[in-house]
Every structure is written in structure tokens, then in C-alpha cells.
Amino acid sequence: MANESPFSAELSNSKVAAIFADPASAREAAARLRQSLELADAQVQVIAPGDPRPGSKLEPESRGIFRTMLRAHLRLGLLGAVAGAVLFAVLYARGIPYIVNSAVMAGAVIVSFGAVAGLFLGGLFTLRPDHDPYITRVYAALELGRTAVVVHSFSREQNAKAAEFLKQYSDEVVATL
């Protein structure tokens, strides 16, 4: 259950969803999946139309997501600032006149731009664009009266195994990265 990313504070970074025509077949596939891959009950959720809180089953780690946001911005912002400092040092060592003549101002600007670039990357990581297809597909299925089985994997390997298993029961399987 080790976290695979130095920027994430979530236990489950990878997710899989499979869409089913009815709740009974979804519950059956979920039970077989839990048994076959030895997954905990909390890792495999069934979301049926009318479920009062489908969002909490799709993305159950709201605290983890908030900590991921803080961690990603802090670490990538600092990494960007360090990259900016390295770039400044390289430009200064090459003797670029503007850099050498205005070293303090040039250093501050380059390091600041590096930090801002890192913060932007932290924002992109926090948005998790790989989760959009997973979330929108499940919500679209629920609106059509269909049922979804969602799996919160602890590793990419577990995610791949869950996706392969669910493809035996459903033609509509979507996984995050």
C-alpha cells in the first residue's frame, strides 16, 4: 500500500470503473472481484442510480486530495525554484552580460519564474486530468439508469488486474493512470 507518487497524499491514486446495465450484475461482479483479487470491501464500491453520495464513492479521499494539493504545490514549487537557481547559475557561469551585470535582479526573476512554473505543475497534478473520463463516464451512466463498480487500487499493478477482471463482465471499463 505504499504511495507511488512523491506528490500525492492519497492512498489510492489509481481507479477503475465498470458500467453495468443493472445493480444485480454489478454487485455480483464486485463480489467476484473482491474475492478474486483479495480486495477490501472499501476498495470496491457499487454506485447505483439514486445513490445519495456517488461523489464520495468515486473520490472518497477528500482529506487526501487536499493534502495532495498542498504537497504537490509545495514540492513542485520548490523544485521549480531550484531549477530556476540552476538555470541562473549556468547563465551566470556562461558570462551572459545581462545576467552578470544585473545578477541580483536576474537571479530573482529566473528563480521566481521557476517557482511559478513549479506551482503551475502542482496545480496540474492536483487537477488530476486522468480522473475526468473516469468520473464523467460514471455520472453519465448513472443518469442513464445504469450501475457502476468502482475500484480504488493501491498500485498500478492492482489497477491493471482489476481492469482486466472487470472487462470479463462489462464492455465499458475506464481506468485512471
Image (cartoon, rainbow, N blue to C red):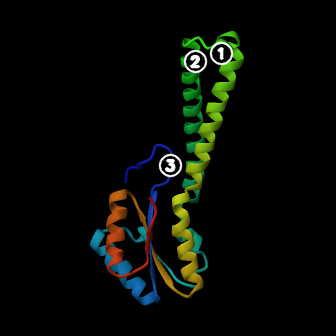
- Residue at screen point 45% across, 64% down: 15
Q: Quadrant of residue 132?
A: bottom right
Quadrant where the N terminus sits is bottom left
In the depicted structure, whether residue 167 falls above or below residue 62: below
Q: Mark 1, mark 3: which one is toward the viewer?
A: 1
Residue ID for mark 1: 99
- Residue at screen point 55% across, 56% down: 128
* Numbered tag placed on residue 8 in the rendering: 3
Residue type at tag 2: Leu
In the depicted structure, whether residue 42 falls above or below residue 80: below
What is the x, y in percent for residue 81? 59, 29
SS category of the residue bearing label 3 = loop
Residue type at tag 1: Ile
Residue ID for mark 2: 91
C-alpha distance separating marks 1 and 3: 36 Å
In-image side of 145 versus 112 (left or right): left
N-term-proximal mark, 1 vs 2: 2
In-image side of 63 versus 33 (left or right): right
Q: Are marks 1 and 2 in contact (CB under 8 Å)?
A: yes
In the depicted structure, whether residue 37 falls above or below residue 144: above
